[in-house]
Image (tube, helix red, strand yellow):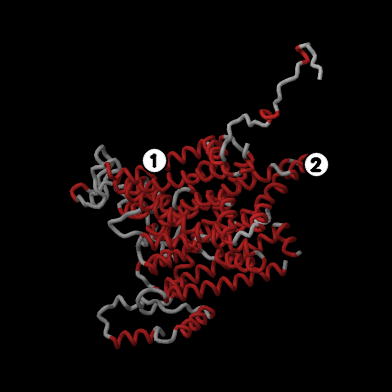
Amino acid sequence: MAVSADPRFAPLPNRQASAERITTPPISFAADAWRRFKANKMALLGFIVLVIFLIACFIGPLLTPWDPTTQFLAGRDQPPSAAHWFGTDAHGRDLFERVLYGGRISLAVAFFAGLLQLVVGVAYGATAGLLGGKWDNILMRIVDIIDTIPLTIYVILLAVIMGQGLTSIFIAIGIVYWTSMARLVRAQVLSLKEQEFMLAARALGASRARLILRHLIPNAMAPIVVELTFSIPRAMFTEAFLSFIGLGVSAPMASWGVLASLGFEGLRSYPWQLAFPSAAIIIVSLAFNFIGDGLRDALDPKLRR
Amino acid sequence: MARYLLQRIITMFLVAFFVVTATFFMMRALPGGPFSSERNVPEAILKNLERKYNLDKPLYQQYIDYVKGVIVWDLGPSFKYKGLTVNDVINRGFPISARLGGIALTISVVVGIPLGILGALNHNTAGDRTISGLAILTAAAPSFVIAGILQYFLAFKTGWFPAATWGGGQLRYLVLPVLALCSYNLAWIVKLTRSSMLEVVNQDYIRTARAKGLRELVVVYRHMIKNAMVPVVASLAPMTAGILTGSFIVESIFNIPGIGREFVQSITNRDYTVIGGLTVFFCLLLAGFTLICDIALALIDPRVRLEKEG
């Protein structure tokens, strides 16, 4: 093959290998989601606030000189000062310390209640979606019936029956409010189970448990996580509500709801005793809502750019 | 339409059955009998007490009696107060709560919907941002926080309104409880109306309506608002549930002798028949209201109407 001597007609080097090269660095789904989450300023702010609250509640009490349960009657009902940042309560306990301790309990109850809703809701929704047909119909009519009932009343009833205490509160909240999670998971499963990868898995002889655990749930994870971020503040609200009507954790333990309820007794003269626990509830619930909004956008593959 | 309604009514009966059964067995699952707190009662008197309240009969017989009682609307006696029945509690408390809740619900709807619409029509202006910011903030505050803020500033600091008395239920006693009760729902309606409107605003049929040369007012009213109202009406039933449970706290804080405070007191007193009876009452009330909302929804939304007919 005659090659022209003219350098203008010299063949280019073979670029077959390099043509296929991906020039941008590979980015995992998690990294991409995190990048989009960071771009949402409110969501990032909510995330930072939540991390600060978690650190403060779980490590903070170790660093302050006060004890949340020792009563100090000489120094009761003091307004906020340099020594007591949030003032003291009716028994002379440092309110800052109490709010931090209360945060542990409020957040823990909310988290475990959310987790329980997740387990019950995912199991129920995935079963309904997978079985389909008549069973799906029956299971979802049951959910319709449950949704018509004012559920808070049943949380109260369960809390009355099981007695006061941390465990009974989160179990009561967790086993009652799972219906929205079940609906969501069912809808996800219904749309996912018709897709090709499910057919492939079934053709390979995967068991039903494996289909659910390895194929369906990971693919439905994004909306589930978003729903979880919204259900945690709801559970926190319910816990505060229960504490307020006298079904909360018992003294000397205290959640934010219990603290707010105690603060009400001296509202006229010592408004800070209600203000600080209430502010904590509002800030954390706002933070969760912003995080939820951010996650919804960040985890949606359709919005991926 | 008829088939849809029939289906809804059957569902309501199932709900009622479910509620009565669940409540009955939950109350029976309580550890210890209702008289276990009275420690010094001799065996014979305990037996008599149990006979009086039919607790010596077999469980299925008690259950049947309870269901019969609910059907003829006799929810049984109070365990704590002699001569007081659950019906008495409902009869004296419910009119007050219904009035309070009715006003709160009306204000939420009448104020909330226009605010949401205004926000959506002036999307991303300073006014819209203020409205939705306030709504988000209010929805993040539990009702007792709002009640506390109102009580502190409008009653204790300024003395404009009574702090925690019911009086005869005249207007000035109503203002603070109603505000506390409707704050969350108001915020919720604003958010819902606004987002529902924003979704409608960019639909093709809105552009078509404008292209036809319809006046803006007609476009907004006939094409946007009518369509945007569907999710708002659909949320009215759960919202009533919210007002109902909100009344537990608000009535306790403002010392209102309504049915919500009775419920909280019966919990404190561990007055089990009253707790159970009021639970059944609340659930049936809400089931009835849900049915009304479903019918209203079927009437305003052609999509629901046609789909369910077919």
Crowd around label 2: few <14 · some 14–19 · many ≥20 (10 Å): few
Residue picked out by circle 2: B212
The chain letter for the residue carrying disc 1 is A
Q: Tell which tag, 1 or 2, sits nearer the viewer.
A: 1
Tag 1 secondary structure = helix
Tag 2 secondary structure = loop
Q: Quadrant of residue A247?
A: bottom left
The location of residue B15, given as percent across then percent down, is 57, 70
The chain letter for the residue carrying disc 2 is B
Q: Kindly identify which numbered label has been placed on residue A85.
A: none
Q: CA distance from mark 1 to mark 2?
A: 55 Å
Judged from this view, the residue extending furthest toward the left is A74
> For the C terminus of chain A, which image quadrant?
top right
Can the viewer see residue B165?
Answer: no
> For the N terminus of chain A, which image quadrant?
top right
Q: Residue at x 32, y 49 (%)?
A: A101
Can the viewer see residue B54?
Answer: yes
Residue picked out by circle 1: A52
The answer to whether marks 1 and 2 mark residues whose Cβ atoms lie closer than 8 Å is: no
Q: Callout 2, which amino acid? A: Lys
Which residue is nearer to you in this view: A251 or B107? A251
- Residue A73 is left or right of residue A123, and the answer is left
The location of residue B241, given as percent across then percent down, is 52, 61
Q: Residue at x 46, y 41 (%)?
A: A47
Q: Callout 1, which amino acid? A: Ile
Judged from this view, the residue extending furthest toward the top is A6
Q: Residue at x 45, y 49 (%)?
A: B141
